[in-house]
Image: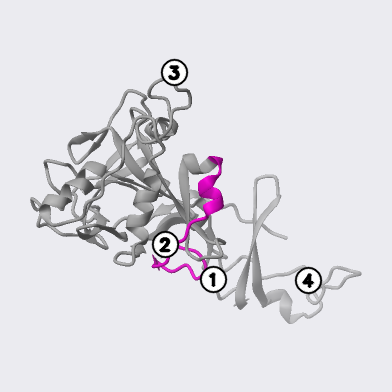
């Protein structure tokens, strides 16, 4: 067996972005039916979030919706003697730590600071790495109509980042195309954007102020209930707005970066022309069986093994068909490793 030492010029690294349908079953990009579980809603976790499924059998969890409020409004207090500490304040604090990384920071949607938000978190089983910017179309229905939301990733020159990765504004639009009727940016300066799209953690944060302000502009009326000591079931308000028969469309794709390591193996004309295969040499004497193979040997390359410096086999590459090799031929074999 013979070896060739690989050098830096023999390696090339390439990265490609692969997109796919996000949702369960056939991995389609759009779901149009939504269901929830009354058992989950009425259980302990129902105080925090509401799971949403794509079929009534509740076997296909797609995403969860929740509501966070900085001051604890919109849900019952943990302790009636401790004001402001409730399920919604816990949700707000969790997302603030995850997204902003600072317990004193505020959510600013399109230049407007917000003390509350709705959140849509896609189930982790639906994607491998993140969501594909520019693929979202989310319809939300209210008493005055339906609004279509997308992210503005195709309309910005530079990308903003925070502790959750990339940040894009949610605007009125479809599949990455911004409807520029509202100040040519897809939302109103007065109420801010419709929220944030955080593709790297597969999360949408919705701005209640922007959604509620659409009533005066011919859009929807969608406001959370913020009673200080009552369970106002705000996640259910958003769920009803998404699952309404007038809306019932949620489109998004997943995105995954596949890194490929290309390794180029180059058997030169003077190399790999002899073999230790039993058909090539005598097992008893070690002599070449056929005299013609002494000065004009012919071999066929079928496999390439990749070893480390201690001669441990790390990977095996199989050729699609045997490659003829003799002193008159050189070969270039490209090996692709995906990871």
**Mark 4 residue element:** loop
* CA gap, disc 2 and disc 4: 42 Å
Compare marks 3 and 4 and give the one earlier in the sequence.
Answer: 3
Residue 107 got which mark? none
Compare marks 3 and 2 and give the one earlier in the sequence.
Answer: 2
Who is closer to the viewer here, 140 or 310? 140
| Residue tagged 2 | 18
Mark 3 or 2, which is nearer the eye? 3
Residue 81 got which mark? 3
* CA gap, disc 3 and disc 4: 84 Å
Q: Residue at x 46, y 44 (%)?
A: 49
Residue 330 got which mark? 1
Who is closer to the viewer here, 53 or 7? 53
Helix, strand or loop for the magenta stretch, by majority: loop
As drawn, is 115 to the left or to the right of 191? right
| Residue tagged 4 | 277
Mark 2 or 4, which is nearer the eye? 2
Residue 117 seen in the current view: yes
* CA gap, disc 3 and disc 2: 52 Å
């Amino acid at each position: 067996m013979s070896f060739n030492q690989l050098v830096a010029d023999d390696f090339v690294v390439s990265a490609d972005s692969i997109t796919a349908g996000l949702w369960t079953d056939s991995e389609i990009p759009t779901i149009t039916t939504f269901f929830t579980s009354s058992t989950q809603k009425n259980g302990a976790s129902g105080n925090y979030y509401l799971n949403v499924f794509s079929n009534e059998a509740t076997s296909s969890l797609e995403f969860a919706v929740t509501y966070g409020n900085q001051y604890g409004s919109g849900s019952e207090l943990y302790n009636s003697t401790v004001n402001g500490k409730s399920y919604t304040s816990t949700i707000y604090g969790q997302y603030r730590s995850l997204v902003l990384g600072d317990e004193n920071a505020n959510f600013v949607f399109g230049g407007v600071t917000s003390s509350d938000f709705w959140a849509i978190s896609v189930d982790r089983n639906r994607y491998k790495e993140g969501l594909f910017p520019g693929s979202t179309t989310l319809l939300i229905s209210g008493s005055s109509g339906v609004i279509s939301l997308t992210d503005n990733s195709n309309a910005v020159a530079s990308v903003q980042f925070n502790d959750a990765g990339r940040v894009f504004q949610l605007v009125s639009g479809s599949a990455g195309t911004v409807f520029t009727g509202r100040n040519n940016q897809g939302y109103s300066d007065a109420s801010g954007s419709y929220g944030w799209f955080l593709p790297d953690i597969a999360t949408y944060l919705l701005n209640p102020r922007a959604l509620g302000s659409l009533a005066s502009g011919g859009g929807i009326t969608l406001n959370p209930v913020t009673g200080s000591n009552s369970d106002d079931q705000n996640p259910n308000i958003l769920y009803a707005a998404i699952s309404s028969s007038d809306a019932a469309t949620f489109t998004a794709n997943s995105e995954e970066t596949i890194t490929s390591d290309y390794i180029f193996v180059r058997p030169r004309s003077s190399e790999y022309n002899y073999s230790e295969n039993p058909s090539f040499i005598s097992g008893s004497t070690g002599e070449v069986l056929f005299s013609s193979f002494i000065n004009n040997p012919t071999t066929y390359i079928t496999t390439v093994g990749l070893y480390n410096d201690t001669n441990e086999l790390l990977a095996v590459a199989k050729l699609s068909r045997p490659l003829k090799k003799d002193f008159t031929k050189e070969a270039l074999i490209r090996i692709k490793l995906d990871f």
